[in-house]
Protein backbone atom coordinates (compact mmCIF):
# COMPACT_ATOMS: atom_id res chain seq x y z
CA UNK A 1 0.00 0.00 0.00
CA UNK A 2 1.50 3.33 -1.07
CA UNK A 3 -1.32 5.56 0.18
CA UNK A 4 -3.44 5.36 3.33
CA UNK A 5 -6.83 7.08 3.14
CA UNK A 6 -7.96 8.66 6.37
CA UNK A 7 -11.55 9.14 7.47
CA UNK A 8 -11.45 11.76 10.23
CA UNK A 9 -14.48 12.05 12.53
CA UNK A 10 -14.29 15.57 14.02
CA UNK A 11 -12.87 18.72 12.46
CA UNK A 12 -12.62 20.86 15.62
CA UNK A 13 -9.53 21.87 17.58
CA UNK A 14 -7.71 18.54 17.24
CA UNK A 15 -9.28 17.46 13.92
CA UNK A 16 -8.38 20.84 12.39
CA UNK A 17 -4.88 20.57 13.86
CA UNK A 18 -4.37 17.12 12.37
CA UNK A 19 -5.65 18.26 8.96
CA UNK A 20 -3.29 21.24 9.05
CA UNK A 21 -0.30 19.18 10.22
CA UNK A 22 -0.83 16.65 7.43
CA UNK A 23 -0.86 19.49 4.88
CA UNK A 24 2.37 20.79 6.40
CA UNK A 25 4.35 17.62 7.15
CA UNK A 26 2.57 14.99 5.05
CA UNK A 27 5.35 14.94 2.41
CA UNK A 28 8.01 14.60 5.13
CA UNK A 29 6.11 11.73 6.73
CA UNK A 30 5.64 10.09 3.38
CA UNK A 31 9.46 10.18 2.84
CA UNK A 32 10.05 8.71 6.27
CA UNK A 33 7.33 6.04 6.07
CA UNK A 34 7.30 5.17 2.40
CA UNK A 35 3.54 5.63 2.46
CA UNK A 36 1.41 8.71 1.87
CA UNK A 37 -1.26 9.89 4.33
CA UNK A 38 -4.27 11.21 2.44
CA UNK A 39 -7.28 12.82 4.13
CA UNK A 40 -10.18 11.27 2.21
CA UNK A 41 -13.15 12.54 4.25
CA UNK A 42 -13.91 14.55 7.40
CA UNK A 43 -17.16 14.23 9.38
CA UNK A 44 -18.38 17.25 11.38
CA UNK A 45 -21.63 18.17 13.12
CA UNK A 46 -22.34 21.45 11.30
CA UNK A 47 -21.30 22.05 7.68
CA UNK A 48 -21.94 25.81 7.92
CA UNK A 49 -19.70 26.39 10.92
CA UNK A 50 -16.78 28.80 10.42
CA UNK A 51 -13.59 26.84 11.08
CA UNK A 52 -10.25 28.26 12.21
CA UNK A 53 -8.57 25.63 10.01
CA UNK A 54 -10.20 25.55 6.58
CA UNK A 55 -11.11 22.06 5.39
CA UNK A 56 -12.23 21.83 1.73
CA UNK A 57 -16.04 21.57 1.53
CA UNK A 58 -15.73 18.56 -0.79
CA UNK A 59 -14.22 16.52 2.07
CA UNK A 60 -16.86 17.43 4.65
CA UNK A 61 -19.98 15.48 5.59
CA UNK A 62 -22.23 15.25 8.64
CA UNK A 63 -22.65 11.50 8.18
CA UNK A 64 -19.92 9.76 10.20
CA UNK A 65 -21.33 6.32 9.35
CA UNK A 66 -20.74 6.86 5.64
CA UNK A 67 -17.13 7.85 6.38
CA UNK A 68 -16.45 4.77 8.49
CA UNK A 69 -18.15 2.47 5.97
CA UNK A 70 -16.53 4.06 2.89
CA UNK A 71 -14.49 1.27 1.26
CA UNK A 72 -11.88 3.85 0.22
CA UNK A 73 -11.22 4.76 3.89
CA UNK A 74 -8.50 2.50 5.37
CA UNK A 75 -7.97 4.21 8.69
CA UNK A 76 -10.52 5.93 10.98
CA UNK A 77 -9.47 8.84 13.21
CA UNK A 78 -11.93 9.56 16.04
CA UNK A 79 -11.54 13.20 17.12
CA UNK A 80 -15.10 14.12 18.02
CA UNK A 81 -14.96 13.60 21.81
CA UNK A 82 -17.70 12.29 24.10
CA UNK A 83 -18.36 8.69 25.02
CA UNK A 84 -21.59 7.73 23.25
CA UNK A 85 -21.36 8.34 19.48
CA UNK A 86 -17.55 8.12 19.71
CA UNK A 87 -17.91 4.58 21.12
CA UNK A 88 -20.14 3.65 18.18
CA UNK A 89 -17.62 5.14 15.73
CA UNK A 90 -14.74 3.11 17.17
CA UNK A 91 -16.71 -0.13 17.40
CA UNK A 92 -18.11 0.27 13.87
CA UNK A 93 -14.64 0.86 12.40
CA UNK A 94 -13.06 -2.05 14.26
CA UNK A 95 -15.91 -4.34 13.19
CA UNK A 96 -15.00 -3.52 9.60
CA UNK A 97 -11.38 -4.43 10.39
CA UNK A 98 -10.22 -0.80 10.10
CA UNK A 99 -7.60 0.46 12.55
CA UNK A 100 -8.65 3.43 14.69
CA UNK A 101 -6.69 6.36 16.11
CA UNK A 102 -8.34 8.29 18.95
CA UNK A 103 -7.44 11.20 21.26
CA UNK A 104 -10.41 10.50 23.50
CA UNK A 105 -9.33 9.81 27.11
CA UNK A 106 -12.90 9.97 28.45
CA UNK A 107 -13.93 7.27 25.97
CA UNK A 108 -10.99 5.01 26.85
CA UNK A 109 -11.50 5.54 30.55
CA UNK A 110 -15.17 4.58 30.34
CA UNK A 111 -15.04 1.83 27.69
CA UNK A 112 -11.35 0.94 27.22
CA UNK A 113 -11.72 -2.71 28.16
CA UNK A 114 -14.57 -3.24 25.69
CA UNK A 115 -12.80 -1.34 22.91
CA UNK A 116 -9.47 -3.17 23.27
CA UNK A 117 -11.33 -6.50 23.28
CA UNK A 118 -13.14 -5.44 20.10
CA UNK A 119 -9.78 -4.49 18.56
CA UNK A 120 -8.29 -7.86 19.47
CA UNK A 121 -11.26 -9.71 17.97
CA UNK A 122 -11.24 -7.66 14.78
CA UNK A 123 -7.52 -7.96 14.16
CA UNK A 124 -7.31 -4.17 13.75
CA UNK A 125 -5.55 -1.93 16.23
CA UNK A 126 -6.69 0.96 18.40
CA UNK A 127 -4.10 3.72 18.91
CA UNK A 128 -4.40 6.41 21.60
CA UNK A 129 -1.15 8.37 22.01
CA UNK A 130 -3.00 11.72 22.05
CA UNK A 131 -5.31 10.65 24.89
CA UNK A 132 -2.69 11.30 27.59
CA UNK A 133 -0.42 14.32 28.01
CA UNK A 134 -0.90 15.76 24.52
CA UNK A 135 2.44 16.14 22.78
CA UNK A 136 4.42 13.94 25.20
CA UNK A 137 4.77 10.48 23.62
CA UNK A 138 4.19 8.76 26.96
CA UNK A 139 2.10 5.88 25.60
CA UNK A 140 4.95 4.91 23.29
CA UNK A 141 7.41 5.25 26.17
CA UNK A 142 5.47 2.76 28.30
CA UNK A 143 4.48 0.50 25.42
CA UNK A 144 7.88 0.31 23.74
CA UNK A 145 10.74 2.25 25.33
CA UNK A 146 10.29 0.80 28.81
CA UNK A 147 8.85 -2.58 27.83
CA UNK A 148 11.68 -4.37 29.63
CA UNK A 149 10.88 -2.70 32.95
CA UNK A 150 8.43 -3.22 35.77
CA UNK A 151 7.03 0.23 36.46
CA UNK A 152 7.31 0.78 40.20
CA UNK A 153 6.39 4.48 40.25
CA UNK A 154 4.63 6.83 37.90
CA UNK A 155 3.76 10.43 38.81
CA UNK A 156 2.06 12.65 36.26
CA UNK A 157 1.22 16.33 36.05
CA UNK A 158 -1.32 15.59 33.35
CA UNK A 159 -3.86 18.39 33.57
CA UNK A 160 -2.59 21.67 32.14
CA UNK A 161 -5.54 23.69 33.47
CA UNK A 162 -4.86 22.71 37.09
CA UNK A 163 -1.13 23.23 36.68
CA UNK A 164 -1.73 26.68 35.19
CA UNK A 165 -4.03 27.65 38.09
CA UNK A 166 -1.67 26.31 40.79
CA UNK A 167 1.33 28.00 39.16
CA UNK A 168 -0.39 31.38 39.07
CA UNK A 169 -1.70 30.99 42.63
CA UNK A 170 1.88 30.40 43.77
CA UNK A 171 3.49 33.16 41.69
CA UNK A 172 0.86 35.81 42.38
CA UNK A 173 -0.44 34.80 45.82
CA UNK A 174 -3.90 34.84 44.20
CA UNK A 175 -6.97 32.83 45.24
CA UNK A 176 -8.31 29.82 43.32
CA UNK A 177 -11.55 31.54 42.19
CA UNK A 178 -9.75 34.62 40.92
CA UNK A 179 -7.24 32.64 38.82
CA UNK A 180 -9.92 30.24 37.55
CA UNK A 181 -12.05 33.14 36.26
CA UNK A 182 -9.03 34.58 34.48
CA UNK A 183 -8.05 31.17 33.06
CA UNK A 184 -11.58 30.82 31.65
CA UNK A 185 -11.32 34.27 30.01
CA UNK A 186 -7.97 33.30 28.45
CA UNK A 187 -9.29 29.92 27.21
CA UNK A 188 -7.09 27.82 29.53
CA UNK A 189 -10.12 26.51 31.45
CA UNK A 190 -13.52 25.33 30.24
CA UNK A 191 -16.88 26.59 31.47
CA UNK A 192 -17.92 24.69 33.56
CA UNK A 193 -14.42 23.75 34.74
CA UNK A 194 -15.42 20.68 36.80
CA UNK A 195 -13.83 17.98 34.62
CA UNK A 196 -10.43 19.64 35.03
CA UNK A 197 -10.42 21.25 38.49
CA UNK A 198 -12.17 18.33 40.21
CA UNK A 199 -9.47 15.96 38.95
CA UNK A 200 -11.61 13.78 36.63
CA UNK A 201 -9.65 14.55 33.45
CA UNK A 202 -6.41 13.71 35.27
CA UNK A 203 -8.06 10.51 36.54
CA UNK A 204 -8.99 9.43 32.99
CA UNK A 205 -5.34 9.85 31.95
CA UNK A 206 -3.85 8.34 35.10
CA UNK A 207 -6.11 5.28 34.70
CA UNK A 208 -4.93 4.79 31.11
CA UNK A 209 -1.26 5.07 32.16
CA UNK A 210 -1.79 2.73 35.12
CA UNK A 211 -3.50 0.14 32.90
CA UNK A 212 -0.68 0.25 30.40
CA UNK A 213 2.05 0.17 33.05
CA UNK A 214 0.54 -2.70 35.04
CA UNK A 215 -1.20 -4.78 32.40
CA UNK A 216 -4.75 -4.87 33.74
CA UNK A 217 -7.58 -2.49 32.93
CA UNK A 218 -8.10 -0.07 35.84
CA UNK A 219 -11.77 0.61 36.44
CA UNK A 220 -12.20 4.41 36.81
CA UNK A 221 -14.47 3.82 39.82
CA UNK A 222 -11.44 2.43 41.69
CA UNK A 223 -9.39 5.60 41.23
CA UNK A 224 -9.38 7.90 44.25
CA UNK A 225 -9.84 11.45 42.90
CA UNK A 226 -9.42 14.80 44.61
CA UNK A 227 -9.27 18.11 42.72
CA UNK A 228 -7.76 21.48 43.53
CA UNK A 229 -10.83 23.56 44.54
CA UNK A 230 -9.97 23.35 48.24
CA UNK A 231 -6.38 24.58 47.78
CA UNK A 232 -6.04 28.07 49.26
CA UNK A 233 -3.39 30.70 48.73
CA UNK A 234 -2.61 30.33 52.45
CA UNK A 235 -1.66 26.65 52.00
CA UNK A 236 0.41 27.49 48.93
CA UNK A 237 2.19 30.18 50.96
CA UNK A 238 2.90 27.81 53.92
CA UNK A 239 4.00 25.03 51.55
CA UNK A 240 6.44 27.49 49.93
CA UNK A 241 7.86 28.47 53.34
CA UNK A 242 8.39 24.76 54.07
CA UNK A 243 10.20 24.16 50.74
CA UNK A 244 7.35 22.59 48.75
CA UNK A 245 5.20 23.34 45.68
CA UNK A 246 1.62 22.09 45.45
CA UNK A 247 0.87 20.11 42.27
CA UNK A 248 -2.08 18.00 41.15
CA UNK A 249 -0.51 14.57 40.71
CA UNK A 250 -1.68 11.36 39.10
CA UNK A 251 0.01 8.71 41.24
CA UNK A 252 0.56 5.07 40.25
CA UNK A 253 2.64 3.11 42.78
CA UNK A 254 3.37 -0.52 43.29
CA UNK A 255 5.39 -1.34 46.33
CA UNK A 256 6.15 -4.94 47.15
CA UNK A 257 7.13 -4.17 50.72
CA UNK A 258 4.77 -1.54 52.07
CA UNK A 259 1.44 -2.19 50.41
CA UNK A 260 0.55 -5.11 52.69
CA UNK A 261 -0.38 -8.60 51.66
CA UNK A 262 -0.28 -9.60 48.03
CA UNK A 263 -3.64 -10.36 46.43
CA UNK A 264 -3.80 -13.23 43.96
CA UNK A 265 0.00 -13.32 43.99
CA UNK A 266 0.63 -9.71 42.92
CA UNK A 267 1.05 -6.53 44.92
CA UNK A 268 -1.91 -4.15 44.53
CA UNK A 269 -1.29 -0.87 42.76
CA UNK A 270 -2.17 2.56 44.13
CA UNK A 271 -3.92 4.59 41.43
CA UNK A 272 -4.97 8.04 42.62
CA UNK A 273 -5.23 11.71 41.73
CA UNK A 274 -4.76 14.37 44.40
CA UNK A 275 -2.99 17.65 45.08
CA UNK A 276 0.31 16.99 46.82
CA UNK A 277 3.22 18.89 48.32
CA UNK A 278 6.18 18.23 46.03
CA UNK A 279 9.65 19.05 47.46
CA UNK A 280 11.14 21.98 45.54
CA UNK A 281 14.25 19.87 44.94
CA UNK A 282 12.18 17.43 42.86
CA UNK A 283 12.04 18.08 39.13
CA UNK A 284 8.21 17.98 39.04
CA UNK A 285 8.10 21.07 41.30
CA UNK A 286 9.44 23.16 38.41
CA UNK A 287 6.89 22.04 35.83
CA UNK A 288 4.89 25.25 35.47
CA UNK A 289 1.95 26.76 33.63
CA UNK A 290 0.08 24.61 31.13
CA UNK A 291 3.00 22.19 30.76
CA UNK A 292 2.65 18.51 31.62
CA UNK A 293 5.28 16.06 32.82
CA UNK A 294 5.35 12.38 33.62
CA UNK A 295 7.97 10.88 35.90
CA UNK A 296 8.41 7.12 35.49
CA UNK A 297 10.59 4.78 37.53
CA UNK A 298 11.39 1.40 36.00
CA UNK A 299 13.11 -1.40 37.90
CA UNK A 300 15.82 -1.64 35.22
CA UNK A 301 16.15 1.92 33.90
CA UNK A 302 15.67 3.87 37.16
CA UNK A 303 14.11 7.34 37.07
CA UNK A 304 13.02 8.95 33.79
CA UNK A 305 11.13 12.16 32.99
CA UNK A 306 8.98 13.27 30.04
CA UNK A 307 7.96 16.92 29.63
CA UNK A 308 5.99 18.94 27.12
CA UNK A 309 2.72 20.57 26.18
CA UNK A 310 -0.17 18.47 27.44
CA UNK A 311 -2.92 19.87 25.23
CA UNK A 312 -3.67 22.31 22.45
CA UNK A 313 -4.09 21.96 18.73
CA UNK A 314 -0.49 21.39 17.60
CA UNK A 315 0.77 19.29 20.52
CA UNK A 316 -2.21 16.95 20.26
CA UNK A 317 -1.93 16.80 16.47
CA UNK A 318 1.71 15.73 16.87
CA UNK A 319 0.61 12.75 18.98
CA UNK A 320 -2.12 11.82 16.49
CA UNK A 321 0.45 11.91 13.65
CA UNK A 322 2.63 9.46 15.55
CA UNK A 323 -0.29 7.01 15.76
CA UNK A 324 -1.13 7.59 12.09
CA UNK A 325 2.44 6.64 11.22
CA UNK A 326 2.24 3.40 13.23
CA UNK A 327 -1.12 2.47 11.75
CA UNK A 328 -0.03 3.39 8.23
CA UNK A 329 3.10 1.23 8.51
CA UNK A 330 0.98 -1.71 9.69
CA UNK A 331 -1.32 -1.25 6.71
CA UNK A 332 1.62 -0.88 4.34
CA UNK A 333 3.33 -4.03 5.62
CA UNK A 334 0.10 -5.96 6.05
CA UNK A 335 0.96 -6.68 9.68
CA UNK A 336 -0.60 -5.91 13.02
CA UNK A 337 1.48 -3.57 15.13
CA UNK A 338 4.71 -5.21 16.32
CA UNK A 339 3.73 -4.30 19.88
CA UNK A 340 -0.05 -4.13 20.28
CA UNK A 341 -1.30 -0.89 21.86
CA UNK A 342 -2.61 -2.61 24.98
CA UNK A 343 -1.99 -6.18 26.08
CA UNK A 344 -3.61 -7.30 29.33
CA UNK A 345 -0.84 -9.38 30.93
CA UNK A 346 -1.50 -9.14 34.67
CA UNK A 347 -4.92 -10.68 34.90
CA UNK A 348 -4.76 -10.82 38.72
CA UNK A 349 -3.84 -7.15 39.09
CA UNK A 350 -5.81 -5.13 41.66
CA UNK A 351 -6.04 -1.51 42.75
CA UNK A 352 -5.04 -0.79 46.35
CA UNK A 353 -8.03 0.66 48.25
CA UNK A 354 -7.34 4.29 49.19
CA UNK A 355 -7.93 3.56 52.88
CA UNK A 356 -4.81 1.37 52.82
CA UNK A 357 -2.61 3.87 50.98
CA UNK A 358 0.17 5.13 53.23
CA UNK A 359 1.32 8.75 52.82
CA UNK A 360 2.90 11.65 54.61
CA UNK A 361 0.65 14.63 55.25
CA UNK A 362 0.56 18.39 55.65
CA UNK A 363 -2.31 19.35 57.98
CA UNK A 364 -3.46 22.90 58.66
CA UNK A 365 -5.69 23.56 61.65
CA UNK A 366 -7.27 26.77 62.87
CA UNK A 367 -6.89 26.71 66.63
CA UNK A 368 -7.73 28.95 69.55
CA UNK A 369 -4.41 30.37 70.75
CA UNK A 370 -4.39 28.89 74.30
CA UNK A 371 -1.96 26.71 76.26
CA UNK A 372 -2.62 22.95 76.13
CA UNK A 373 -4.15 22.88 72.62
CA UNK A 374 -1.14 21.21 70.98
CA UNK A 375 -1.09 18.53 73.68
CA UNK A 376 -4.74 17.63 73.01
CA UNK A 377 -4.13 17.37 69.26
CA UNK A 378 -0.97 15.28 69.81
CA UNK A 379 -2.91 12.91 72.10
CA UNK A 380 -5.55 12.20 69.44
CA UNK A 381 -2.82 11.47 66.87
CA UNK A 382 -0.84 9.28 69.29
CA UNK A 383 -3.97 7.21 70.05
CA UNK A 384 -4.27 6.59 66.29
CA UNK A 385 -0.55 5.61 66.16
CA UNK A 386 0.19 8.60 63.94
CA UNK A 387 3.53 10.32 64.42
CA UNK A 388 4.11 14.07 64.04
CA UNK A 389 7.37 15.08 62.36
CA UNK A 390 6.94 18.79 63.14
CA UNK A 391 4.48 21.39 64.41
CA UNK A 392 4.77 24.91 63.07
CA UNK A 393 2.82 27.95 64.19
CA UNK A 394 3.55 30.50 61.46
CA UNK A 395 4.12 33.98 62.84
CA UNK A 396 2.12 37.07 61.93
CA UNK A 397 -1.33 35.47 62.20
CA UNK A 398 -2.72 37.04 65.37
CA UNK A 399 -6.46 36.82 66.05
CA UNK A 400 -9.08 34.75 67.83
CA UNK A 401 -7.71 31.68 66.04
CA UNK A 402 -4.28 31.03 64.55
CA UNK A 403 -3.13 28.56 61.89
CA UNK A 404 -1.06 25.58 63.00
CA UNK A 405 0.72 23.32 60.54
CA UNK A 406 1.39 19.67 61.38
CA UNK A 407 3.75 17.64 59.22
CA UNK A 408 2.78 13.99 59.70
CA UNK A 409 4.89 10.84 59.25
CA UNK A 410 3.71 7.95 57.06
CA UNK A 411 0.18 6.92 58.03
CA UNK A 412 -2.62 4.99 56.33
CA UNK A 413 -5.28 7.16 54.75
CA UNK A 414 -8.13 5.73 56.85
CA UNK A 415 -6.26 6.29 60.15
CA UNK A 416 -5.47 9.87 59.15
CA UNK A 417 -9.04 10.62 58.11
CA UNK A 418 -10.46 9.22 61.38
CA UNK A 419 -7.93 11.11 63.50
CA UNK A 420 -8.76 14.39 61.72
CA UNK A 421 -12.49 13.80 62.27
CA UNK A 422 -11.77 13.51 66.02
CA UNK A 423 -9.45 16.54 66.00
CA UNK A 424 -12.12 18.66 64.28
CA UNK A 425 -14.43 17.97 67.23
CA UNK A 426 -11.99 19.40 69.80
CA UNK A 427 -13.38 22.66 71.21
CA UNK A 428 -10.15 24.55 70.48
CA UNK A 429 -10.13 23.60 66.78
CA UNK A 430 -12.27 25.81 64.56
CA UNK A 431 -13.43 24.93 61.05
CA UNK A 432 -12.49 21.87 59.02
CA UNK A 433 -8.86 20.70 59.09
CA UNK A 434 -7.04 20.95 55.74
CA UNK A 435 -5.13 17.81 54.78
CA UNK A 436 -2.79 17.61 51.77
CA UNK A 437 -0.55 14.63 51.08
CA UNK A 438 3.22 15.10 50.94
CA UNK A 439 4.94 13.12 48.17
CA UNK A 440 8.43 11.92 48.96
CA UNK A 441 9.04 10.09 45.63
CA UNK A 442 10.80 7.26 47.50
N1 LIG B 1 -8.36 20.13 22.57
C1 LIG B 1 -7.28 19.57 23.09
O1 LIG B 1 -6.29 20.24 23.41
C2 LIG B 1 -7.24 18.08 23.28
C3 LIG B 1 -6.07 17.49 23.78
C4 LIG B 1 -5.99 16.10 23.91
C5 LIG B 1 -7.10 15.34 23.58
N2 LIG B 1 -8.24 15.94 23.14
C6 LIG B 1 -9.39 15.09 22.78
O2 LIG B 1 -9.63 15.21 21.38
C7 LIG B 1 -11.02 15.03 21.12
C8 LIG B 1 -11.52 16.23 20.31
O3 LIG B 1 -11.34 17.41 21.07
P1 LIG B 1 -11.49 18.85 20.39
O4 LIG B 1 -10.91 19.80 21.40
O5 LIG B 1 -10.95 18.84 19.02
O6 LIG B 1 -13.08 19.01 20.35
P2 LIG B 1 -13.91 20.03 19.44
O7 LIG B 1 -13.09 21.21 19.08
O8 LIG B 1 -15.20 20.26 20.15
O9 LIG B 1 -14.18 19.21 18.11
C9 LIG B 1 -15.11 18.17 18.03
C10 LIG B 1 -15.41 17.91 16.57
O10 LIG B 1 -16.30 16.80 16.46
C11 LIG B 1 -17.37 17.14 15.59
N3 LIG B 1 -18.55 16.39 15.96
C12 LIG B 1 -19.20 16.38 17.13
N4 LIG B 1 -20.26 15.53 17.10
C13 LIG B 1 -20.25 15.00 15.86
C14 LIG B 1 -21.10 14.06 15.18
N5 LIG B 1 -22.14 13.49 15.78
N6 LIG B 1 -20.80 13.74 13.89
C15 LIG B 1 -19.73 14.29 13.27
N7 LIG B 1 -18.90 15.18 13.85
C16 LIG B 1 -19.17 15.53 15.13
C17 LIG B 1 -17.56 18.64 15.76
O11 LIG B 1 -18.22 19.17 14.63
P3 LIG B 1 -18.46 20.76 14.48
O12 LIG B 1 -17.08 21.34 14.26
O13 LIG B 1 -19.32 20.90 13.29
O14 LIG B 1 -19.09 21.20 15.76
C18 LIG B 1 -16.10 19.10 15.88
O15 LIG B 1 -15.55 19.29 14.61
C19 LIG B 1 -11.67 14.88 22.50
O16 LIG B 1 -11.83 13.51 22.77
C20 LIG B 1 -10.68 15.50 23.45
O17 LIG B 1 -10.76 14.97 24.76
C21 LIG B 1 -8.34 17.29 22.97
Image (cartoon, rainbow, N blue to C red):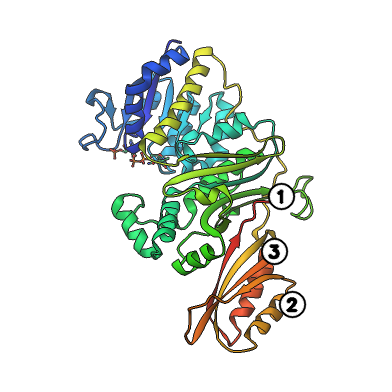
In the picture shown, does residue 292 fall above or below 18? below
Is there CB contact under 8 Å for labels 1 and 3?
A: no
Is there CB contact under 8 Å for labels 3 and 2?
A: no
| Residue named by callout 1 | 268
Specify few, some or many for label 1: CA neighbours under 10 Å numbering under 14, 14-19, or 20 or more.
many
| Residue named by callout 3 | 412
Lower sequence index among marks 1 and 3: 1
Looking at the image, residue 11 sits to the left or right of residue 165; the answer is left
Looking at the image, residue 216 sits to the left or right of residue 369; the answer is right
Q: Position of residue 241 (x, y in %)?
A: 53, 65
In the picture shown, does residue 216 fall above or below 181? above
Q: Where is residue 265 in the image (x, y as percent from the top left)?
A: 79, 45
Lower sequence index among marks 1 and 2: 1
| Residue named by callout 2 | 383
Where in the image, quadrant-wise, is ligand 1 located? top left
Under tag 2, what secondary structure?
Answer: helix
Amino acid sequence: MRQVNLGIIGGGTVGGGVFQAIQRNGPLMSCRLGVQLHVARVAVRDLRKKRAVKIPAALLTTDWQSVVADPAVNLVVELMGGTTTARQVVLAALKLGKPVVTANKALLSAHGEELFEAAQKSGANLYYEASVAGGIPIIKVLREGLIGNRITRLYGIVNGTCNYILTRMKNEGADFGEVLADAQKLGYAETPPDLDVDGHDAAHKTGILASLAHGFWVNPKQIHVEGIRQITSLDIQFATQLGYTIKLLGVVKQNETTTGPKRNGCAPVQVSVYPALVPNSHVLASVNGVFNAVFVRGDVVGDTLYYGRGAGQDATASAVLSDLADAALDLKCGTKSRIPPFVPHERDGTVLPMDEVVSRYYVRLNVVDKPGVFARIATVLAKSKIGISSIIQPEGHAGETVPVILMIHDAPNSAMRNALARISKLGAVKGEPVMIRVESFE
